[in-house]
Image (spheres, rainbow, N blue to C red):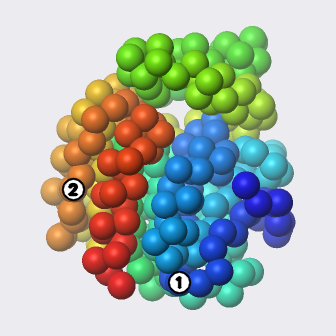
Amino acid sequence: MNTPLTTRQGAYFCFGSQGPWVVLSHSLATDHTFWEPQINALVRSGWRVLAYDTRGHGTSPCPPGPWSLDDLADDALALLDQLNIDRAHFVGLSMGGMIGQHLALKAPQRLASLVLSCTSSAYPPGARALWDERIALVRSQGMQGVVAGTLERWFTPTYRAENPGMMARIAHMIRRTPIEGYAACAQAIVTLNTTGRLGGIRCPVLVISAQDDPGTPPAMHDIIEAAIPGARRARLSGAHLCNIESADAYNQALTDFLNSLR
């Protein structure tokens, strides 16, 4: 992976030398490196890729919270401004998809398209207690306290058993996430409620769901697909991080969608 570059918004990484820009926004408790299968596929297909570490993650700074999803979308927008990128294709998974929704609603002229992967447009009221429990756990036990449960949600049992090296890599990514970065982003996530506004998104949209995703199941993606005019849908196997577990199928769906917009 490339050496990190930095702006006031944090660390970012550029790949490829030509083609339209594709911006990759990662999930909670990860960093830009979990996009490696997609970065390679996109560069081979003639795209330039901007992958960045969300605030409080990876090598980006962790300013004092609380933060909102609008704040995280503003970070992405400011990064585009500083790099003089007028328009880009935005790909988000989980938290990254939530950021993408806010960005598309806030600055629609900046997005050439939007890919919403394994994400949601709202959480039920009971979700706040669950997220509060996870935040309390990391504050009392450190990030190690959520590693096992997170891996169980993110990958199917078969994939976990057959890929111990990848599980070790993702576990390390979770453990090195700053506690306050995790907590502040989790507090932002639980406020998510864009469903009623999704009809205002006018750029081409691809919605990607995974059939065994317990955190953002296909039914959540049905709501998003129905709310956005002309949204396309890809249904993949695997669990929450289907960009890793079902990387080939994810890459095919992603590159097919982007290439159709050239």
Q: Which residue is label 2 attached to?
A: 233
Name which residue lies at 65% across and 51% down.
32
Q: Is residue 50 left or right of residue 262?
A: right
Q: Quadrant of the C terminus?
A: bottom left
- Looking at the image, is 170 positioned above or below residue 98? above
Of residues 18 and 8, which is closer to you in this image?
18
Cβ atoms under marks 1 and 2 closer than 8 Å: no
Q: Secondary structure at mark 2?
A: strand
> Quick check: can you spot residue 171?
no
Name which residue lies at 50% across and 77% down.
46
Amino acid tagged 1: Gly
First in sequence, mark 1 or 2: give its number. 1
Name which residue lies at 40% across and 15% down.
157
Residue 151 pos. (x, y %): 53, 21
Residue 160 pos. (x, y %): 48, 18
Q: Which residue is label 1 attached to?
A: 19
Residue 115 pos. (x, y %): 38, 61
- Looking at the image, is 4 positioned above or below residue 104? above
Q: Secondary structure at mark 1?
A: loop
Identify the disc placed on residue 167.
none
Q: Is residue 198 left or right of residue 44?
A: left
> Quick check: can you spot residue 151?
yes
Q: Is residue 7 left or right of residue 28?
A: right
Of residues 193 and 101, which is closer to you in this image?
101
Amino acid tagged 2: Arg
